[in-house]
Amino acid sequence: MKKDRCTAIVLAAGKGKRMGSEIQKQYLLLNGRPMLYYSLDAFQKCERINEIILVAGAGEEEYCQREIVEKYRFSKVVSVVPGGRERYHSVANGLHAITDCDYVFIHDGARPFLTEDIIERAYAAVIEYQACVVGMPVKDTIKVVDRQSFAVDTPERNALWQVQTPQVFSYELIRKAYDLLLEQGDEAAVTDDAMVAELLLGSKVKLVEGSYRNIKVTTPEDLKIAEAFCSGN
Ligand code: CTP
Ligand code: MG
């Protein structure tokens, strides 16, 4: 039987506004290496993954190629492509750089604690369901609020998961969903890839257990947590 071809798209084209640092968060050093190194390293070392597409900020492609891909010898990175204004533009650019594959793993370059276990759990789910996202049950009670911040609802906590990445799809399915999204030009509310598949194709997306360590480094507090994880605390 033909082996599935798996491609990872690693997103590193964000501006990191909430981090507020001078250099974008994906290049900040964690334990001596740029944050972006860690997710690329996880995909590089995982046999399941054949190729990696790195989406860098427009104009930063050469820097990424030299200072990340070549410096750390990420031989699976087949292209470094420019990102776009919003995350979904960057994803669309990544998808367009793929020539042939069966499954696509879309991952935030700002999530350095991706593991092989997570990749394998997601793979097992995507071959069965065609669309899956990694996440974890929420720990806090979540309130729905109105525009004045008054609580209007308290959804049952057992039914709530926080979504992480990778978000993994059959290539055909996610390509079709993103093409439709860009065609319709009604992308304002899109915050993750699963939403694109849910809204545009009515796909059922399976949630797969990630890890509470698989955090997205978003604010300076998250950077402290990430540093603590790196030093084994
Ligand atoms: N991302 C991207 N292209 C964009 C926006 C985001 O590739 N136009 C990437 C980021 O680099 C990050 C991931 O998507 O790896 C998740 O986004 P987020 O945490 O929101 O990062 P930023 O957009 O950089 O941060 P902020 O929203 O605070 O500006
Ligand atoms: Mg953002």
Image: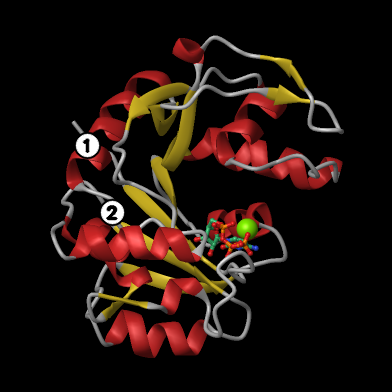
Q: Regarding ligand 1, which quadrant of the image does it lie in?
A: bottom right
Q: Is residue 175 above or below residue 43?
A: above
Q: Quadrant of residue 149?
A: top right
The three-letter amino acid code for the residue at tag 2 is Phe
Q: Is residue 3 in view?
A: no
Q: Residues within 10 Å of mark 1 (few under 14, many from 20)?
A: some
Left or right of 24 in this view: 223: left
Please tell me which residue is depicted at 64% across the width and 37% down the height of the picture: 176
Report the residue at 65% width, 52% height from top.
88
Q: Earlier in the sequence, mark 1 or mark 2?
A: 2
Q: Residue at x 48, y 89 (%)?
A: 62
Of labels 1 and 2, the one closer to you: 2
Q: Position of residue 34 (x, y in %)?
A: 34, 77
Q: Quadrant of the C terminus?
A: bottom left
- Is residue 212 visible in this depiction of the protein? yes
Q: State the residue in front, 39 or 182.
A: 39
Q: Which residue is nearer to you in this view: 16 or 51? A: 16
- Image quadrant assignment for residue 92: bottom right
Would residue 196 be found to the left or right of residue 223 on screen?
A: right
Residue identified by numbered label 2: 113
Residue sitting at x 24%, y 81%:
32
- Rendered image quadrant of residue 192: top right
Give the amino acid at mark 1.
Glu
Determine crowd level at label 2: few under 14, some 14-19, many 20+ residues with C-alpha closer than 10 A. many
Distance from label 1 to label 2 (Cα)? Answer: 15 Å
Per the image, label 1 sits on a secondary structure element best described as helix
* Mark 1, residue position: 120
**x, y (%) of residue 96?**
58, 58
Residue 77 location in percent, x, y? Answer: 34, 70
Position above or below: 63 against 189? below
Q: Is the CB of the residue bearing disc 2 within 8 angstroms of ligand 1?
A: no
Picture coordinates of residue 196, whole percent (x, y): 65, 35
